Image (spheres, rainbow, N blue to C red):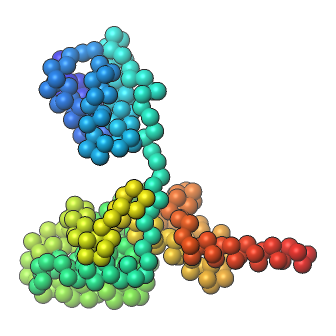
Amino acid sequence: MKWSVLVAQYLQARRDLGYALTVDGKILEQFAAYAQSQNERMPMNVELVQQWARLAPSNSEIAIARRMSIVRAFSKYLHSVYPDSVVVPVNLVGHTHRRLPPFIFSQRQVKACLEAASNLLPCYGIRPLTIRTMLGLLVSSGLRPGEAIRLKQNDIDIEKGTLTIQQSKNWHRRIVPLDSSTVISLKKYYDVRELFEPLKHSDGLLLMDSGEALTIEAADHAFKIIRKCTNLDCKVNGRYPRLYDFRHTFVCRRIQAWYEAGLDVNAFMPKLSHYLGHKRIENTYWYINATPELMKLAASRFEEYCAQGDQL
């Protein structure tokens, strides 16, 4: 039986149980194509799996381990159907996850990115303003990039100053209050959009000059250009600054502002967690990075706490 057929059967069985397996499915289809190109037949050949895993484009240990992990799950299914087929040993998988420290943008760098977005091509098109508006949303509200590009016109309430996130990662629907300056920027974006006839009839919020909605691929491509224009086109902690890092930056700057205002940060964390769309507060702590500003403020707060203890 062809590997592509076996993979299709496995994916169908898992999806019938409610698993999407979008990424896993693509990776397994790549494995099936490779196995067939090598004229490999059942049962599963562990050495072939390792050989294919090492062909991961990034060639990183994590990418290789993830490939091994995905095929291991597939191999367990094959073993249940064909007992003679071996299961990929777990000791060959390796670590599939690692937290790389995010890039935290300074205010100067944020300003530079916004200015660079305004200078994108075409000069007289909507694309520069679309990318700048998207960046402004990420900076001011901490949205996930995917949430921003999926926004529809009806998701924005200019009068109330809120936006509605539909089908986010953890919630069916959540309301996100916006800063007044963000609302003004969105209103300006609407006004400019009305000047472009092809864009008037689209229900998407962030649009390209073709009238189609902004995609994550187009947003990432634009940000690569912005990185080059702002001297951010270099790896930090093993990777380039990403659009997702604006979400990390939002969390760090919000906590920093609470410290500077003398507020009880721990009391505000549940509110921040809900605002970001997290169901578990520990997911919010994942976004915090030990910036010099935060560490200095936290140390100062701790010194005050110790001083109060000495007085008692």
Q: Is residue 19 visible?
A: no
Quick one: which residue is furthest to the top in this view? Answer: 84
Residue depicted at 86% across the width and 73% down the height: 309
Looking at this view, is 53 or 253 the one in front?
53
Left/right of residue 259 with respect to residue 172 in the rendered view: right
Residue depicted at 21% across the width and 88% down the height: 191
Q: How many marks?
A: 0
Residue depicted at 35% across the width and 83% down the height: 111
Looking at this view, is 142 or 59 the one in front?
59
Measured from the top left, where is residue 125 in percent x and y?
Answer: 12, 81
Measured from the top left, where is residue 2 in percent x and y?
Answer: 17, 21
From what the image shows, is residue 71 above or below residue 308?
A: above
Looking at this view, is 299 or 162 the one in front?
299
Measured from the top left, where is residue 7 in percent x and y?
Answer: 24, 28
Q: Can residue 218 be seen in this view?
A: yes
Measured from the top left, where is residue 300 in percent x and y?
Answer: 70, 77
Looking at this view, is 259 or 62 the one in front?
62
When asked about the image quadrant of residue 17, the answer is top left
Left/right of residue 82 with respect to residue 209 in the rendered view: right
From what the image shows, is residue 244 above or below residue 76?
A: below
When asked about the image quadrant of residue 303, the answer is bottom right
From what the image shows, is residue 5 above or below residue 102?
A: above
